[in-house]
Image: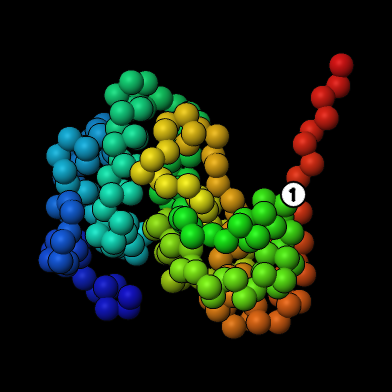
Amino acid sequence: MARWLPLTTDDAVAALNALPGAPRTFVPSQALPPGDAYETFIARTGTVPTRHHLHDLFNGLVWCAEPEIKARLNALQADHIAASGVGGTRGPVRDALTLFDENGATWLECPPPIADAWRRRDWRALFVTHRALWASVPPPRLVGHALMEQLAQAPRKSLCAHVLLDDPLALAPGAWATKPFLPLPVLGVPGWWPANADPTFYDDPAVFRPLRSPRLSHP
């Protein structure tokens, strides 16, 4: 990505617009009127305000790689803003959509034994016992542009994706509100980081945390 750093905003916008099959027009960030919600502006104009740094670069690249997912997220955000306004807080639906947009991943092909171990936060079973299963299917597909930015600039063990095992195109707003994600420390994915070839890589409870016990209610 180093070749992008000297570019002006107009250069970056032009480069994104020149990509084959770009599903939206990318415009300089100054095109967003003051007081206009970012998501509403995209939905209304079909253009994506873009600043000159890696965060917005990856956002543009995800628009080109996953246009249906990005369009779905944008439509749900815009609908929610139209119904409820921007407000001081996003609310559960917009909060989940933003979390997924920034740090999400999808894995529709997740093998059931991996999904079962994952839901139990049995990290050793997930990454060591079932390690061969990871190579038997396509890996998780990152869609979160903020996560990509961090992986490019400062990869570290604690970076976590919020993974959706369901189809994001079919998920209803109410389902989004529950944040139906599984946490994935991405450098733990077999083959994604050399150090995780050693099973002791996963013996780090600060990153590979056990499942939280439900809070007990008191009378």
Quickly name the residue at label 1. Answer: 211
Q: Is residue 118 left or right of residue 33?
A: right
- Which quadrant would the N terminus be assigned to in this image? bottom left
Q: Residue 136: percent from the left, percent from the top?
A: 53, 73
Q: Residue 198: percent from the left, percent from the top?
A: 71, 82
Residue 33 lies, with reference to residue 151, above or below; the image says above
Q: Is residue 63 left or right of residue 167?
A: left
Hey, which residue is sitting farthest right in the picture?
219
Residue 196 lies, with reference to residue 52, above or below; the image says below
Residue at x 63%, y 61% (from the top left corner): 114
Residue at x 65%, y 78% (from the top left corner): 196
Q: Identify which residue, 74 or 156, lies in the foreground.
A: 74
- Examine the rendering and report whether any part of residue 37 can be seen: no
Q: Answer with the quarter of the image where residue 4 lies.
A: bottom left
Q: Residue 143: percent from the left, percent from the top?
A: 40, 57
Amino acid at dot 1: Leu
